[in-house]
Each structure stands twice: as structure tokens, then as C-alpha cells.
Amino acid sequence: MEKTLVLAIIIQLLIASFSSLLVIGLASLFDPAALDRYSAERTEIGIVGGGEVMKFIEKSQVKPYFYSDLSYALTDFNRNRIDAILVIPPVGAYSSEIIQLVLYLPKSDIKGTLVTLQLKKPLEEYEAFVRDVRSPRIGFKPVRLYVDEAPKKTSTYFEFIYGVLIPLLVFTPVFISGGLIIDMLTEEYERKTMELLRVSPVYFSEILNGKMLAAVIIVPLQALLWLSLVGLNGIEIYNTWGILLLVSIVAAVIVMIGAIIAVKYKDRAISQYLYSLILIPVFLSGYLFADSPFNLVARMSAGSAGAGSLVYFLIYGAVTVPLYIYLKNIQDM
Amino acid sequence: MGLLTISRWELRRTRLSFSRKTLALSLLLIIFTALVSFFVSHSGFRINDGIYSVVVTDPELASVIETDYKFRVYVADGIEAKDLFEHGGFDGGFDILVTGENISYHRSERSTAALDALDKAVIRYDEARLLSYNDLNNTFPVWITVKNLAREQEFKPLSIQKLPDFEATPRTTRSAPVETPIEVTIRDNPHAPSAREVTESRAALPIKEKALSTPSHFNPPIPFKSVVLSFLFIFPVFFIAQFFSASITQERVRRRGELLLVSPVRPYEIVLGKLLPYLLLSLALMGAIAVSIGGNVWMLAILLPVALMFLSTAFLGALIARSFKELTFILVFLSVTLSGYIFLPAMFTNIHAISIISPMTLVVRLLEGEAVTAGEYVFSTLPFYLVSLLILMFGIFIYREEDLFTQKPIKSKLVDSIQVFIERVPAPLFFLSMALLPLVYSIQLIMIVLMFNLPIRYGIIIFILLAAFIEEIVKSAGIYTVFSRKLSTSTTRNALKFGVLAGTGFFIGEKLILLAVIAGIADSVFGSVMGIGLLVFPLMLHVTSTTLASLCLRYFGPGNYMGSLILAAAVHSAYNLYLIRGVLSG
């Protein structure tokens, strides 16, 4: 038992290190601009043409080099002297034509990504500037809000940590426990020991309960380990006990589902297969509604929800009752 | 002949355990999954719902902010709002107060994040509104056309200059923004969009090609597609591998395989015969998936090594596991590592050349209508082929009664398989370290994938230490087996001889791999650490460090294997660190 637990923790460590690596990938999935945190160097961009947009580019992180002609710029681009080329058309903000910029990027090169990231902000500012000139023509008024000294902080990192990473970390042990109970039960069947134990039905239900309890109890322990690890990294976690309670409730539901499958099918491979098939939609539906366990954990850990979430605990807890009754029924068969 | 008979038996067995009811149920579940994913993709991922709370005085502004699900918005008048903002009262407290048009926020992490999110929400709202004017020239005045040109990557030495490849990107050169079809529903009166419309507006912008965008939609290539694709392909194989390993473990637990073993069928026929139906099934499924998402059957050439890898590792897992529980954990461990190896680099498709170490990148590229060169194919699939063959070979070595039906620890089973290799192959130590090379190569590639995300200076140092350690394990594994199993007398002369043999074998194997893979990363800093580079010094290095480990085993006994390894790895990494000192200091 201890050996499998050690293995379980090693696997989770692996998953965790992978998912922290996924920070880059997923954060860029959320908001590619977040990658900017990883890039301090200034990209060097060849500029062909000029105009109002230069005002914004000169203020930004990129380093402009001017060319009179695209072919000279392309030569330097191919010699790796510049990372990208921006061709600016001779159209001003006050005309009514669309301004078509052309950007040459190196293909399959991280430099291209960096250029995109560093050019995004000045180009957005430029767009806002042109809009300010042109949108009064059609009577558009933007929503304006004012703030003194806005901090330079992006929400992506915060939302990724609390919205994705922490829910994923605390629910991984839940999914593992569901698989664990299937293994524990089907192994008994495979080794035929269950036949002996099943002589007395009361005895069997005790064994079943004991195994399920063990599978559930290890979940909040592992979740606590994760939360404290995240905490050690300087991320503040609110409502730890609430999260652990919620995770235990969900673990009870998942473990019972696993137990039902194992008791019904008795074959390990089939049971594991069905369990994974069930797990996917269950996991996906966690992203369907605002008060799913994932979102509850996100809100609780970020401290933006408190006692109000307890209602949902009761709802999720109630799911265990029919599952348990059903399990009782099929185990007696 | 025996092989096919075994295949037929195996097929019948799995079919029996798969009742009609199970099939119906799994079909039902797959339909249910499809439904759920349809809803998720339709309404968007609901992540971070209600994570921020805002109190505003202007009810109109409240309806603007409410278009973003991340916010919970409360309307209150001036003094009450200020009081709520400063003293909480509501669970979690308020992150932002908007009095009229002026924003106040707290100094907390959440509050500053909320400020940025609010900014984004307002911009999204405005863009959705602008879109309804149906006047691109005045509402979306700036467009960017991106043209990707192939050029040599920076870490390669500059070779022949290529002219910019305009023909390769006809899609992008042709398209001027004005020509793009504009599919905006015409509305007479611009109106305030609802939350749903704001979420959908991103998709509604008339952008048909990713090469063209407005500044706010101007983003680096998003890896989402590669990840979904990898998942799509790996998922069925993962299950099939589960069934394969379960079948083998079941035979071991129920001791049913004993009869087969005493029959005249050879072990390799049994193993390959069992493997065949599963492999064909995976290929059929993958082929069907490939065709259904617009690929062709040629993709199977890329997916075959992936399927082989999953099945062979599952096979090894089934052989060394002592119980189903252990099997589950070994399988999860293996599939997490493998998926990481396949997923992570694929995320960098179109971002970085490193991505071609994953075969999935090639699949993505084929789907995007790009060509894949033979060199790239070899580079990304060769490790998969070699490692799976290697694993199958060593698995077949221990496919015998004493290993199948006993509860030996994992390590001793691995040593068993090496012992069989040593007993059957001439000059075993020389060829063993050569044969294990693909394994080393793959592990090092996985490590490169991992290290690529660290700051390069630390990444390289950690990589050197780990790479040296792994190479030393592989080189001395045979020597350890010889000494611990007493296959030869433990003399200093033997220790020296074994060290030289194993070190030379590894060196020659390494150079052979170099011939196969003169592409991609071979010239990068990581490549030179992998020992691809100079000739004489690496040979001396491999021989010296392995002989060192060998001598340690001779004098301190096989019990001190770990210590010998660490010593050898230290010498090895010291050399490599010296080799790339320029990169580290500069």
C-alpha cells in the first residue's frame, strides 16, 4: 500500500511538473500576450515606409531599423540581421481607407512569436488612435473609464493559477482514487478471494465500505499537500478547509461511480475503460456551468467566494445518496 | 504460422470479454461526451466565472461589465458603494469600485488582476458594438497581413542563402483585406450587445484566414489545435494499450500462459502474435480518425511508431508489474511521460523548430497542407521505432516462466533481461550499450523538451548532469549485471576490459545516430551536449567514465552501484561543462 502511494505521488509530481510547463502553453492559449513575461530581449524590426504608426512603435519594446525598399530589408532578414519586416502603407488616419500593414515573420521560429507579442501593444494603440479620429464620423462613443496610476499587471497569470492550475491539482487525486477503487475491487475478483468473502453479504459490504473509505480519505490529504506546495511558491490560498471538504465530497461521488462499475463488470480492463469513458464528459461538464466544482474551487482559492458556496456542497453531497443506494442494491445481487 | 494462430486466439479472447452490452454502453458514453463537448465549445469554457466582484454606481455600466462572466456586478449609490468597497460585507469583498467613470481598486493581487480583466472586458464590449455598424473602414481601420517566410534558424550555422519563398505562401500573398468576404449581418441600428454576443463577436469578425487580423486579434499561433489533435489520436491507442497489458497481466495472474510456454511456439511468436491484433486495431482507429478530420492514410506512417511505442511500453509494464494496482501506476506513469513527449513539443508547432521531435507536429503540418521532408520524418519517428523494438526485444527475453509467474522486484527483472542479452549475443557489453542508445536518446529528447522552458543557462547545467547520469547508467548496466550475477570473475583486468568495451560501443552507436539525424537540433547547444560533435575526446570520455564505474564495481562491489554511477557521471558532466563553457559564460 505505501509503495503504491509513493508511486501515486511520483506520478502526480510528474503531472504537476508537466502542467507547470504547460503554463506557457496554456497561458498562451488563454492570452498569448502573457508569454511576454518570458521575453526581455528587444526584437529588431525592419520598417519599410513610415507615418503615424511609428510614434507608437518607437515607444514600444521593439527596435526599429529603417529601409527604403523591401528587397534590402528581405536581404537583411535572410541574413538574420533583423527578426521581422513591417511594411507601412502611405495611408493616414484622416483618410477613410483601410490601413493595410504587412508583416513578414520568420516561419517556425520563436522570434516570430516574440515579434508578434511585442508589436501587439503599439499596434493596438495605433488602432485606438485611428479609431478616435474616424469613429466620430459614424457617431460611435466608446465606453470610457478612468483610473489613477494603473499597475502594469496582466490578469492572465492570476486567472490561470486560480482558474486552471489549482482546480486541476486538487482534482487529480480524485480521478486517481476512482481508478484505484476499481483496481482494489477487481483485483479481489480476479484473485477469486471475493468468492470466499462473499459467503456473508454483510462482510462483503464492510469490505466495500472500507475500501471506498480508504480511497476517499487519501484525496484530501493529497490535495492538502498540493495546496501547501502551491502556498510555498508564494501563492495565497483562501478557504483551504472548504476546498478540502468539496474535494472530499466530489471524491466520494467519483469513488462510488468507480465502485459501481467494478462491482457490475468485475473485469479490470473493461471497468477501467468504462470509468475513463465516463470521466471525460464528467470532467468536461466541469467547464459548462458557473457553479461547477472546478469554478467553486477557483473562486474559493482566490478568496472571491466564502460561505455562500456551502449550498452547492449540499447539492453535490446529495448526489452520493442515490449512488450509494444503487451500489447497495447491486452488491447484494 | 504460430504467430497468426496466437493472434486469432487473442482476438477471440478480447471479443468475448467485450459483451454487446458493454459496446452499447461505450457508444452511448461517446455520444454523451460528444454532446457535452458540443455544449462546451458552443458556450465557451466557463473558467473563472464570477472570480471578480465589482460595485458600480452607474446601472448602465453594470450591464456593460456583466457581458463578461468573470465579473459579479453590484449596483449601489455613491456612499453605500464606497462603504461596500472598503469594508467588504459581501463574501470575498469587492475588488473594484467604479464611481461614475472613476475606478478605485485595492492593492491586492486579485484586485489588480480584476483591473486588467475589466479593461479587456470593456474593449471586447466596444469591439462587439463597433462590429454592428458594419462599416469596416471606420470601425476596424487597421489590418495586418502576416507572411511567414522560411529562413535558417538562428542556432544553425549560416549555410546557403535562400531567396524568400513566395510561392510557398500563396494564400497569404493573394489576400488583401478588402477582398475578404465580409459576413456581418446588417443591422439598421447599432445596439448594445448582450453577454452572448460579446463572447461570440470574436468569431464573428470577418477573418477567414489566420494570416489576416486587426491589432486586437493579432496573436501568435495558438497551440490549441495541435493539442486537441494529439489527444484525439493518442486517446484510442491509450485504451488499446490498456487492454493489451491487461490481457498479459491476466494471463500472468491466472497462470494460464504456462500451457503456451511449454508448447513448441517460440516466445517471440507469442508476444508478436498477441501484439498484432492490438496494433492493427489501433492503426485502423487512427486511420479512421485521420481520414475523418481531413487527413489521408499516409499519416499512418507517422502514427505507426506512436502506436508501437504505446503498445510496447504497455507490454513491458505488464511484464514487470506484480499486481494490477502496480500495473495501473506503471501505465499511468508511462503514458504521462509519453504524452508529455508527444504533446509538449507539438504545442510549439509553427513557433519553434524544436517541435518536430514530436511526430504529432508532422501530423498537424500535413493537415495544414504543408510538406514533410524525409529527414524530418526520420528525425521524429526513428526514436519511437528504435525504442519500441528495443523494449519488445528485452520483453521477449524475459517472457519465460521464471519471470512471468514469480513476484520478482522490477529491478531484478530488468537485470534478468540484460543477462539474457549477455548470454545470447557475442561481445555483449559492446553491443548492449549500443543497443540501449535509442533509449538514452529518447530520454534526452524528453529532457530537452522539459529544459527548454527553463532559463537556458540553468537548463543546460541540469540537462548536462542528468544526461551524463543516464548515459553512465546505460553504459554500466551490462557491467553491473556481469558482476552482480557473477557471469565472469571480478578482476581488475576484466573491469578495465569491460569499461573499454562498453564505452567504445556507446561511442560508435552515438556516431551512427549522428548519421541518421543530421537535422534539427544537432547543431544547437543541446546537441553538442548530447555528444554530437568532436570525435576523439568523446571516445576517451566514454571509455574513461565507464571504466571508472567498472573499477568501482570491481573494488566496492555491485552493492555500491549508485555511488559508482554518481562518480562516473560527475567526471562525464565535468567534461561536458568544460566543452560548452563558452555558452555558459557568454
Image (tube, helix red, strand yellow):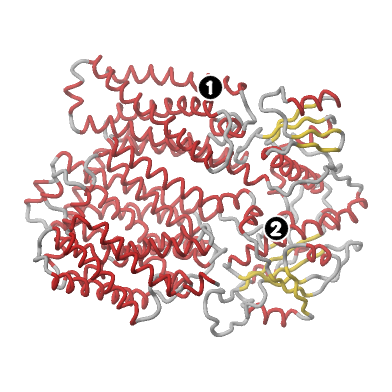
For label 2, the SS is loop
Work out whether residue A8 or residue B50 is closer to the camera in this orientation and state it: A8
Question: In which quadrant of the rendered view does residue A214 lie?
Answer: top left
Lateral position of residue B495 relative to residue B263, left or right: right
Instruction: Identify the residue position indicated by label 1 in the image.
Output: A313
Image point (35%, 61%), residue name: B305
Q: Which amino acid does label 1 sit on?
A: Phe
Q: Residue B19: x and y, percent?
A: 29, 35
Chain containing the residue with disc 2: B
Nearer mark to the viewer, of 1 and 2: 1
Instruction: Identify the residue position indicated by label 2 in the image.
Output: B218
Location of the C terminus of chain B (image quadrant): bottom right
Location of the N terminus of chain B (image quadrant): bottom left
Report the residue that reaches farthest toward the bottom.
Answer: B160
Numbered label attached to residue B84: none
Lateral position of residue A327 relative to residue B398, left or right: right
Q: Residues at marks 1 and 2, common chain?
A: no
Q: What residue type is labelled 2?
A: Phe
Chain containing the residue with disc 1: A
Q: Is residue B29 visible?
A: no
Work out whether residue B242 or residue A255 is closer to the camera in this orientation and state it: A255
How many other residues sit within 10 Å of disc 1, few (<14), some (14-19) or many (≥20)? some
Position of A2 relative to B172 (above/below)? above
Work out whether residue A278 or residue A198 is closer to the camera in this orientation and state it: A198
For label 1, the SS is helix
Question: In which quadrant of the rendered view does residue B514 lie?
Answer: bottom left
How many other residues sit within 10 Å of disc 2, few (<14), some (14-19) or many (≥20)? many
Image point (61%, 34%), residue name: A302
Report the residue that reaches farthest toward the front.
Answer: B555
Q: Residue A78: x and y, percent?
A: 63, 79
Position of A80 relative to B366 (above/below)? below
Image point (70%, 28%), residue name: B93
